Image (cartoon, rainbow, N blue to C red):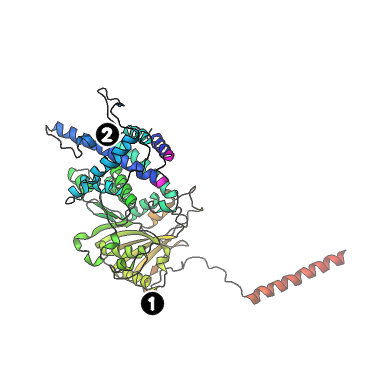
């Protein structure tokens, strides 16, 4: 039922002139789902207050609640089409009354950024309604109203469907790829880093919040479900920052559907903050993330970092190292050129990482892991506080060419997760003693010493000599045939 509802919403958006792409479909579905969720949340809290004999103070004024403008119902609980706005009236209400009202919560709640009120203001300050036909919008609202949000099972199914929409957006092309990291890779990183109850988890390039959502599921499944633990998991465990408007909204909605009521995601450019201002209170126990590939930052942004470079991912890496507590653990996806680039910034950054952290594992991912991105990546696993002495390299080989029809799966990652515990060595995984590397370059793109030796390339003289020998042999064979005839 849920899946068909989402498909029907997409079909309507496809017909609307205001929604041009898969990105628009996710963005427009997100704000509608958010308000539908908020309505159920308010009803649930009102019911809980009533059971305690208390009054509940609603967040939204009566005229802006879902049951008033989106889906008014008669005394029998059926949609009241006499009261429901549609056509141009509905679009005008949404664009000129609803969105400005909701955006106003950001200013009202500026002193309490962790609250859902502030998230409402942030979302509707950054998003616009792109659905131009009020008749299409009316159909979508009616479909969204059918989605149940009350039970954990309902939210779990909705979260899976929403993840599918994000994945489709990532597969749709270049623009969407920045929002989606393959979930089997995220789950493998989480299994290795092993975030625990009571620890703080941070992603400064949060995107669709895949790392935070999967980490929530991981910790929730391994903790004692006490009131204190659940409150800490909800409010004081997961933190993120995101620069892009749409990604910020998608990340919040994704976390809400996974069970986090008011996600601690800040809408900001992480790299605009000087790493020299990061204090102990700003640091985290665990960092897991996939910072943007190939971006270029302006000179004024580079001034926030000790190692100046225009490469966005390398600035993020400095931010993450500085944001880890002593003993903190990280799993960070980065382009594989990080291991071997010879420019001064890359050499300095590798030196900084190796001297301040224990880079214990490098996971080398095959091409095609990130659909549409066309880049080769590695995952750096490290712990802050002790210098690196030995690095274990694992080259993932799924035994097939990966792409849209053969994406990465959890089974592909199973061997790595298991072997990472003991770090054995063979033709596909090996160790490097840091004392053996060239300290002029700190090059980490080392060849596997256990790999079978490849036959050396022959010199031109050897090739010509073999050709001459073969010609001579051929002539002798032809001569023998003629003599037989």
Q: CA distance from mark 1 to mark 2?
A: 67 Å
Secondary structure, mark 2, is helix
Indicate left or right for 116 with 22 as reference: left
Viewer-proximal residue, 320 or 327?
320
- Quarter location, residue 14: top left
Q: Is residue 137 magenta?
A: no
Q: Quadrant of the N terminus?
A: top left
- Quarter location, residue 316: bottom left
Does the image show residue 209? Answer: no
Numbered-mark total: 2
Residue at 43% across, 38% down: 15
Secondary structure, mark 1, is loop
Quickly name the residue at label 1.
Answer: 440
Horizontal and vertical percent position of residue 90 = 31, 35
Q: The magenta stretch spans which residues?
A: 13-23
- Checking the image for residue 41, the label placed there is none
Does the image show residue 294? Answer: yes
- Checking the image for residue 69, the label placed there is 2
């Amino acid at each position: 039922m849920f899946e068909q509802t989402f498909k029907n919403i997409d079909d309507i958006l496809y017909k609307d002139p205001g929604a041009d792409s898969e990105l628009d479909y996710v963005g427009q579905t997100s704000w509608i789902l958010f308000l539908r969720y908020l309505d159920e949340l308010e009803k649930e809290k009102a019911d809980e207050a009533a059971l305690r004999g208390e009054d509940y103070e609603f967040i939204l004024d009566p005229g802006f609640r879902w049951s008033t403008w989106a889906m008014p119902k008669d005394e029998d609980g059926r949609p009241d089409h006499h009261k429901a706005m549609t056509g141009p009236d509905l679009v005008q209400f949404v664009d000129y009354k609803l969105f400005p009202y909701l955006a106003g919560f950001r200013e009202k709640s500026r002193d309490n950024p962790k609250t859902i009120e502030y998230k409402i203001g942030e979302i509707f300050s950054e998003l616009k309604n792109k659905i131009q036909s009020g008749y299409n919008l009316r159909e979508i609202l009616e479909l969204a109203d059918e989605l149940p949000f009350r039970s954990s099972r309902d939210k779990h199914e909705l979260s899976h469907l929403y993840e599918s929409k994000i994945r489709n957006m990532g597969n749709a092309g270049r623009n969407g790829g920045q929002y989606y990291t393959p979930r089997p890779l995220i789950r493998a990183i989480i299994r290795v880093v092993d975030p625990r109850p009571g620890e703080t988890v941070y992603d400064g390039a949060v995107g669709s919040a895949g790392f935070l959502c999967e980490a929530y599921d991981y910790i929730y499944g391994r903790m004692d479900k006490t009131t204190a633990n659940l409150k800490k998991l909800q409010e004081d465990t997961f933190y993120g920052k995101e620069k892009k408007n749409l990604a910020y909204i998608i990340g919040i909605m994704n976390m809400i559907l996974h069970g986090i009521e008011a996600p601690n995601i800040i809408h900001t450019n992480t790299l605009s903050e000087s790493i020299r201002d990061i204090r102990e209170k700003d640091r985290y126990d665990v960092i897991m993330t996939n910072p943007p590939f190939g971006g270029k930052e302006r000179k004024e942004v580079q001034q926030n970092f000790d190692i100046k470079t225009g490469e966005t991912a390398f600035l993020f890496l400095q931010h993450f190292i500085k944001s880890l507590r002593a003993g903190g653990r990280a799993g960070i996806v980065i382009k594989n050129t990080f291991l071997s680039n010879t420019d001064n910034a890359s050499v300095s950054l590798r030196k900084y990482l190796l001297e301040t952290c224990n880079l214990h594992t490098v996971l080398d991912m095959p091409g095609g892991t990130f659909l549409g991105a066309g880049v080769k990546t590695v995952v750096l696993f490290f712990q802050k506080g002790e210098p690196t002495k030995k690095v274990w390299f694992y080259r993932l080989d799924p035994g097939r060419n990966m792409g849209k029809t053969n994406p990465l799966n959890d089974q592909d990652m199973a061997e790595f997760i298991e072997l990472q515990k003991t770090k054995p060595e063979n033709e596909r995984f090996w160790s490097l003693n840091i004392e053996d590397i060239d300290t002029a370059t700190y090059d980490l793109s080392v060849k596997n010493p256990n790999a079978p030796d490849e036959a050396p390339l022959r010199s031109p003289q050897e090739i010509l000599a073999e050709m001459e020998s073969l010609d001579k042999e051929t002539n002798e064979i032809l001569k023998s045939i003629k003599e037989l005839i």
